[in-house]
Image (cartoon, rainbow, N blue to C red):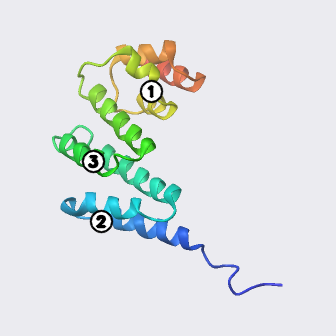
Amino acid sequence: MTSPHLDEEPAEHRRFTHYLQALATVAETDEADLVAVVLHDQDATMADSAVGRHLDRRAADLLTGPQFTVWAQTMAEAIADRDFLTRRLHEWTLLRTLALGNPWTAEELTAASDWFQRMASTTQFVASSEALGLLAERGRSRRVRNAASQRLRH
């Protein structure tokens, strides 16, 4: 027995897709307001996921450019009450620190999330042999330690 509603996409999936599209095309001047709108969705998990994807995309695009700092400050205000998003933005800022060759501490890298350690050990953003050496030795997972070791050898 089939129902005409069986193939319909759930409402939160449609909103998620809509939010991703809107965030991908929003004007810079309206970005923080749109993020706030998305974060007020009734499904907090879905909203966090949509904004998280947006943060990842925008941070990667802006990472080594001069606009990153102002953008990150603006986003920090918009997401201040969301722990996961705040941590992700902080870790993008730490990736920027590494990418630009600015000072960092071993504790910052070793205390960072699995996501951060994977990004730092596998992406072109981090070229610091010191940071890669630390992750090769003290990375949280075997995957991170192996990836950092491999990058050091090449």
Quarter assignment of residue 7? bottom right
Q: Depth check: 22 or 154 in front?
A: 22
Image quadrant containing the N terminus: bottom right
Label of residue 77 in the image:
3
- For label 2, the residue is 25
At which x and y percent is residue 111? 45, 22
Viewed as shown, does residue 69 lie left or right of 125?
left
Quarter assignment of residue 67? top left
Task: Identify which residue is drawn at 35% across, 13% down.
Answer: 130
Q: Residues within 10 Å of mark 1 (few under 14, many from 20)?
A: some
Residue 37 visible in the displayed image? yes
Spatial CA span between label 3 and label 1: 21 Å
Q: Depth check: 51 or 98 in front?
A: 51
Specify which label sits upstream in the sequence, 3 or 1. 3
Specify which label sits upstream in the sequence, 2 or 1. 2
Outermost right residue: 1
Label of residue 19 in the image:
none
